[in-house]
Image: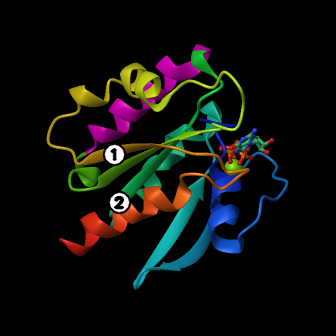
């Protein structure tokens, strides 16, 4: 969803620093070379009015990274609905799912277990998924998430 921290994560991993962002309308793309893999990262705006455009990006997608604002329990059910909706799309049938439970630097942020529950991740059928707590501001957890993707992608 909007305000989750996708763009902040994109530039944190590709530039190594937290930058100031504005809400994304459309997308940002960066190439990210990590552990002998070259990721083409597409960061897509999460505002409700532009969510219908997400499907344009599904073709040839190897992995979906869902970023969740762990300080926003009120909208966790919306994230769940959007996640299960995109997972039902045939184009994404073989895509890996990495969930970042972002903003862990904020006191009182939901734990990854709580986010996992709220997203009903265990209800996803035939999907390889992982959830990783992280902070785009401190950088905590981000490479752990990409490590999981690398391990899974190398097996394919
Ligand atoms: N405290 C904290 N703030 C964060 C973190 N990640 C992002 N933010 C802040 O959250 C706000 C939204 O971040 P963005 O990266 O623009 O969010 P987005 O998911 O790209 O949002 P859309 O482009 O609208 O879909 C910004 O003010 C960020 O600085 C984090 O890990 N911790
Ligand atoms: Mg953005």
Left or right position of 85 against 90: right
Q: Secondary structure at mark 2?
A: helix
Given residues 125 and 14, the one toward you in this image is: 14
The stretch of residues the image draws in magenta is 74-89
Q: Quadrant of the C terminus?
A: bottom left
Residue 93 image offset from top left, x and y in percent: 21, 50
Name the residue rendered at 24%, 28% in the picture. 122
Evaluate if marks 2 and 1 touch, with contact meaning CB atoms under 8 Å apart: yes
Residue at mark 2: 148
Name the residue rendered at 34%, 45% in the picture. 130
Mark number for residue 149? none
Q: Is the CB of mark 2 within 8 Å of ligand 1?
A: no
18 to 14, vertically: above or below? above
Label 2 packing within 10 angstroms: few (<14), some (14-19), many (20+): some
Left or right position of 122 against 103: left
Whichever of labels 2 and 1 marks the residue nearer the N terminus, that label is 1
Residue 71 shows in this picture: yes
Residue 61 shows in this picture: no
Residue 43 image offset from top left, x and y in percent: 59, 57
Q: Secondary structure at mark 1?
A: strand
**What's the image's color scheme?**
rainbow
Q: Give the prevailing secondary structure in the magenta stretch.
A: helix
Choose top left, top right, bottom left or bottom right for residue 120: top left
Q: Quadrant of the N terminus?
A: top right
Residue 121 image offset from top left, x and y in percent: 31, 30
- How many labels sit on residues? 2
Label 1 packing within 10 angstroms: few (<14), some (14-19), many (20+): some
Whether 78 is among the magenta residues is yes
Residue at mark 1: 130
Residue 100 image offset from top left, x and y in percent: 50, 44
- Give the spatial CA distance, label 2 vs label 1: 8 Å
């Amino acid at each position: 969803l909007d305000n989750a921290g996708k763009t902040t994560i994109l530039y944190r991993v590709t530039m190594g620093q937290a930058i100031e962002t504005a809400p994304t309308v459309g997308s940002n793309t960066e190439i990210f070379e990590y552990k002998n893999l070259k990721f083409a990262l597409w960061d897509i705006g999460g505002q409700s009015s532009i969510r219908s455009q997400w499907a344009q990006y599904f073709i040839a997608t190897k992995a979906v990274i869902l970023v969740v604002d762990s300080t926003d329990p009120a909208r966790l059910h919306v994230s769940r609905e959007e996640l299960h909706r995109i997972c039902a799309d045939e184009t994404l049938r073989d895509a890996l799912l990495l969930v970042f439970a972002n903003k862990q630097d904020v006191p009182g942020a939901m734990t990854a277990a709580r986010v996992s529950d709220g997203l009903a991740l265990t209800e996803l059928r035939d999907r390889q998924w992982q959830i990783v707590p992280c902070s785009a501001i401190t950088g905590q957890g981000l490479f752990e998430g990409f490590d999981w993707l690398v391990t899974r992608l190398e097996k394919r």
